Image (tube, rainbow, N blue to C red):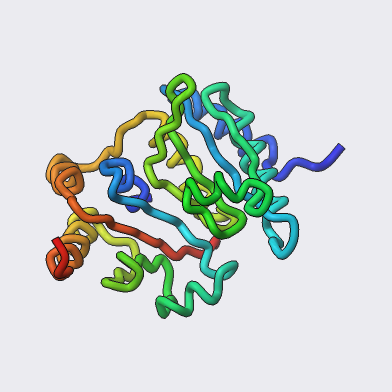
């Protein structure tokens, strides 16, 4: 039996936190067969996390084999993670992405993002929401991080 | 992550957290040295460090105001 990435303690804490999950969330994981050192671990991590709540599900894609889907979600790097809202059979893509393994501090971001999307609410101030909702041109935010 | 929260508010906004060490060419392209480093619209503006909402809003505003196309 393969060893788990997340230990019992972390798993317990996350399960508890996931008690607050409201609506369903789907995580689309994009890997690639070669030249992706962190694909296996990232996939395992997402599998273990999404297994902790029935509000979460995961689907695994391959950048090459599932090129159409990758293009649809504008994912061109592996490991790639898309966190989408799931309402019945519909997926709503908010444009939330991770590229690279979300470990260390970014693991917390992953958990928080799952809660965020599940709650269907940004949690931002009213002024900020109004500004963002009024944006009429594309805005692409790329946040470079490093696991600590 | 603030950027991800913002992405939720508009279909025009997308936000990607990128692990800098796994993607060195991309990090170099935007001159990433300290993290977090947020680049808006592929280098139109850069924000270094974790900043409050209002700061990131102001930078986005600046970028959108500065672009010539309507």
Residue at image position (55%, 44%) is A69
Q: Outermost residue, top direction?
A: A88
Task: Decide if residue B29 is on the left or right side of residue A31.
Answer: left
> How many numbered discs sit on the rendered protein?
0
Q: Residue at x 63, y 29 (%)?
A: A51
Q: Position of residue B2 (x, y in %)?
A: 33, 51
**Most extreme residue toward the front, as rendered?**
A68
Left or right placement of residue A102 versus residue A23 in this view: right
Up-down: is A59 above or below B55? above
User: In which quadrant of the rendered image does the C terminus of chain B lie?
Assistant: bottom left
Q: Is residue B35 above or below residue A126?
A: below
**Residue A101 at what x, y percent from top left?**
59, 55
Q: Is residue A63 above or below residue A125?
A: below
User: Where A28 sits versus A101, above or below?
Assistant: above
Residue at horizontal 35%, vertical 51%?
Answer: B14
Q: Foreground: A135 or B34?
A: A135
A140 vs B66, left or right, is right
Q: Nearer the viewer, residue A75 or A65?
A: A65
B46 left or right, relative to A93: left
Residue A72 on image: x %, y % = 48, 46
Q: What residue lies at 59% left-to-right and 67% top-to-bottom?
A: B22
List x then y, in percent, for residue A128.
Answer: 17, 47
């Amino acid at each position: 039996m393969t060893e788990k990435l997340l230990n019992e303690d972390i798993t317990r804490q996350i399960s508890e936190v996931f008690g607050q999950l409201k609506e369903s969330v789907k995580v689309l994981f994009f890997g690639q067969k070669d030249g992706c050192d962190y694909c296996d671990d990232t996939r395992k991590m997402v599998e273990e996390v999404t297994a902790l709540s029935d509000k979460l599900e995961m689907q695994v894609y391959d950048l090459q084999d599932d090129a159409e889907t990758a293009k649809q979600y504008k994912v061109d790097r592996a490991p790639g993670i898309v966190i989408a809202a799931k309402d019945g059979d519909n997926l709503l893509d908010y444009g939330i992405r991770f590229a690279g393994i979300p470990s260390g501090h970014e693991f917390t971001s992953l958990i928080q993002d799952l809660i965020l999307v599940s709650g269907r609410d940004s949690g931002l101030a009213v002024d900020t929401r109004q500004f963002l909702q009024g944006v009429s041109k594309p805005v692409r935010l790329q946040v470079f991080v490093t696991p600590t | 992550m603030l950027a991800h929260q913002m992405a939720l508010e508009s279909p025009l906004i997308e936000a990607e957290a990128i692990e800098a060490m796994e993607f060195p060419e991309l990090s170099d392209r935007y001159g990433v040295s300290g993290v977090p480093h947020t680049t808006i619209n592929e280098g139109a503006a850069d924000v270094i460090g974790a900043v409050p909402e209002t700061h990131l809003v102001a930078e986005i505003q600046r970028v959108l105001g500065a672009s010539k196309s309507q």
